[in-house]
Amino acid sequence: MFPHGLQPHRATVAMGFVTGMLSGVAARTIDFGHLLAQAGIASEELDDRGGRVPIRSYADLYNVAVQELGDEGFGLFSHPVPVGSFEFLCRSVLSSQSLAEALDRASRFLRLVLPDLAVSILPGQGTSQLQVVEARPLQSDRDDPRRVFALEWILRWLHGLACWLVNRELALNCVSFPYAEPPHAADYALIYTARSTFGSPHLAATLNSNLLELPVRRDDDALAAFLDGAPGKIVTLYRRDREMVHRVRDVVAKSFPASVWLDDVARRLNLSSRTVERRLHEEGSSLRAIKDALRRDIALSRLEKSDQSVAQVAANLGYADASAFFRAFTAWTGLSPTAYRARTRSGGVRQGDPRAAGALHAFRTT
């Protein structure tokens, strides 16, 4: 479901996020007309409270504002967040073994570059909480647009980075925001969760504890690609209005087990190959990533629920030999297919094996 007024064919951003991003600049009486022009946004569009801008323009505005201000925090905090902080945040967590470790490292890194906010992970048996508490009040008015956007921004940073690290979307069960519901709150269903509440003492996002056990699946090469267009790129990823991703996944799924190529997908969608490729890139995905995610989901399901041999599962997924499937499956879960099947059927997951637990319970989506 899309928020009222949002057309599902292209990803767009509510004007409240644009004015929120610029609120720190405006408070300093700095003219931002040239920033909007560089991003392809007309100044008069800001007057339309119900207006929307293309997500690509929003990401461009994000980057030009950061470069202009020399502050990745948009002038919203007591001290600038140095340019390059997001890159070094990513580098500081890349070697983590699990998402829990990565978020712990991230919280410690943020204490250095963003002392106004204290980020912590509160683990629980079934659900855990990502909590952001103000070390000092960001604004005297809890509903000040600068404070609202600052908290929206830090949660987007952390949630987007977490999704990227484990190479899948992570469902937030609910999020409590420490301010009154803003006019653009309908978009929270696309960015965070459909289950948002307002007026809480501090920002708190709840997720299933087993997601924290997921392994980090990124390396230096993946990081180099991720940082192309960063930090603004983070706002384009892991949204629920990635319509092209879902359309392409439908084509791939309906064609399974036959393989489809980009030209095949484009023809079935009545689009050019270049348009499909560009739209997938804008939504943070690719045909290869979609194929791999579909294979992964089918493999996990068949090993859990069918009696097919591992060789049969591999062949049905299009692998030329079982050894290639073995390598792919081990990369996904940290277990061999046989070991994964045995553990799912016994209901046992060895303590301290984060990949196994993540594979058993993770939120599966492209």
Image (cartoon, rainbow, N blue to C red):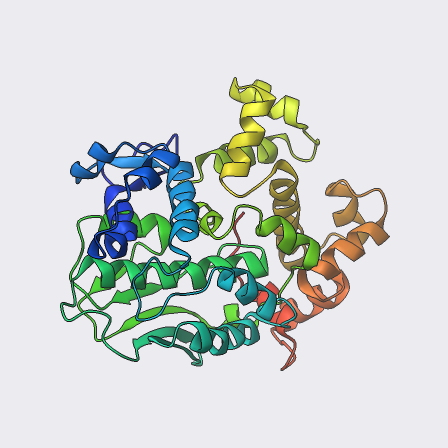
Pick the front one: 16 or 190 = 16
Left or right of 298 in this view: 245: left
Left or right of 81 in this view: 93: right
Image vertical order of residue 13 relative to residue 143, above or below? above
In which quadrant of the rendered view does residue 151 lie? bottom left
**How many marks on residues?**
0
Residue sitting at x 27%, y 42%: 14
Image vertical order of residue 34 relative to residue 129, above or below? above
Image vertical order of residue 316 relative to residue 155, above or below? above
Q: Is residue 250 visible?
A: no
Q: Position of residue 275 (x, y in %)?
A: 54, 24
Residue sitting at x 62%, y 72%: 96
Pick the front one: 192 or 37 = 37
Q: Position of residue 87 (x, y in %)?
A: 55, 60
Residue sitting at x 28%, y 39%: 33
Q: Position of residue 184 (x, y in %)?
A: 22, 48
Pick the front one: 83 or 180 = 83
Q: Quadrant of the N terminus?
A: top left
Q: Position of residue 245 (x, y in %)?
A: 51, 37
Q: Is residue 164 visible?
A: yes
Residue sitting at x 42%, y 81%: 124
Left or right of 338 in this view: 83: left
